[in-house]
Every structure is written in structure tokens, then in C-alpha cells.
Amino acid sequence: MDLILKYFPDLTDLQRSQFERLEELYLFWNAQINVISRKDTDSFYERHVLHSLGIAKVMEFAPGSKVLDIGTGGGFPGIPLAILFPEVQFHLVDSIGKKIKVVKEVTKALNLQNVHAIHTRAEEIKEQFDFIVSRAVTAMPAFLPWTKGKFLPESKSPLPNGILYLKGGDLKEELSSVRQAYTIYPLHSIFPGEFFETKAVVYVQMAT
């Protein structure tokens, strides 16, 4: 939790309380439904919460924005972002029902009013959003078709509407076939440490 406060010192008392409760909630639910890697539980705040919040260091969502989290798993990056941006609506989607059950239980326990969790495939979502976020669900060329037709045409945040994708490794080859304008934001320049050495936020512009 000290790690979160180090990089996000201006949290309200409510936000601080919600972030503090995350670990116990996920340890409880992970013992019943495996949604995060067992080896990562000792580094929960670094590898799940702070990693998710890397998106917030790249882009501050405007109040009233709608954000879709595709392949949210147990709620990452969507739940940490929803805590940080209470005036933004987050729609968390996963095709695995038991993972969405965990998202709903965590959301209920934290009384997050800005999270809507849906058990469905990304292709079935017909709504439009300002941004789509995700954490290493698949390679970007495979991910892009899932987002087709899902962006609102008008942008109200600092960056035009688009994708904010948490990804690791060498991205040059993976992004070589992406025709849209994109920017890579290395996270090791924001969060020092071995875990973030190869991690990045990839922003793909999908609206003008």
C-alpha cells in the first residue's frame, strides 16, 4: 500500500481505504477462484494494482468518460482505475463467468458505484466508449478487431479516444502491422524496479 501512496499521494480517505482493502479481498477470493497468479500474491500491490495504475500516469480520464476493460480477468486494470477515477464509468468484460463473479464481489465490497461487470465476449458489446483498456490479453493485431465500432467519435480527455494497453516484452514486431497511430510509454521510466523493466502502456489512437 505504501507503494501506491508513493506514486499517488493525493488519494482521498475513501480511495485510500478502498486500495487498502484490495489485498485482503483478492486473497480471500483467490483461495476459492484462481484469478491471479499465486506467485504474484506476495507482490500484489506492485504487480497488479500499481501496474494497472500505469495507465493513469499516461492518461487522466475526463469526468463522465466511459471506459471498457476487455478481458478484465479478476478486475485488472479496471478496478484500480475505477477507484482512482470515481467520476468515470467502467465496464469490465470477461468471457469467463467465475472471474466476473470475483469482480462483482470485490466491487460490491468496496461499494464502487462506477463499475459495471459483464460476463460476455468483447465481440458482443454494442455500446461505444471513450477508451478501451486491457492488460496483455493477446497480441495487439488480434486485439484490434475486438474494438471495432466501439469508440465514441468525440474526445473529451487529453488524448483522442483510443486503446490504452498494458503490455510487456519487445513490442516492435508485434506493432509493425498496426496501421493506426500509436505511442509506447515505458513504465520503467515511471515506476523503477525489475518488474517494470519491460512493461509499457501502448496507446493506439482510434478517434480523431
Image (cartoon, rainbow, N blue to C red):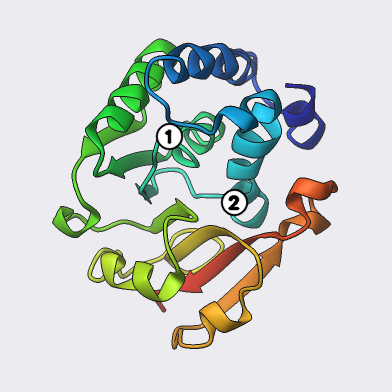
Is residue 200 found left or right of 110 in the rendered image?
right
Q: Quadrant of the C terminus?
A: bottom left
The residue identified by callout 1 is: 75
Q: Quadrant of the N terminus?
A: top right
Q: State the residue at coordinates (40%, 22%).
A: 112
Residue 108 image-quadrant placement: top left
Say which element carries label 2. Answer: helix
CA separation, marks 1 and 2? Answer: 14 Å
Is residue 196 found left or right of 118 in the rendered image?
right
Vertical placement of 152 versus 44: above or below? below
**Going from the N terminus, do you reach mark 1 or mark 2 first?**
2
Front-most of residues 121 and 83: 121
Residue 9 shows in the view: no
Residue 27 shows in the view: yes
- The percent position of residue 202, horizontal first and vertical second, equals 57, 66
The residue identified by callout 2 is: 55
- The percent position of residue 121, horizontal first and vertical second, equals 20, 51
Q: Are marks 1 and 2 in contact (CB under 8 Å)?
A: no
Q: State the residue at coordinates (47%, 31%).
A: 86
- The percent position of residue 178, horizontal first and vertical second, equals 46, 84
Is residue 7 found left or right of 108 in the rendered image?
right
Vertical placement of 159 versus 12: above or below? below
- The percent position of residue 30, horizontal first and vertical second, equals 46, 20
Q: State the residue at coordinates (56%, 33%).
A: 84
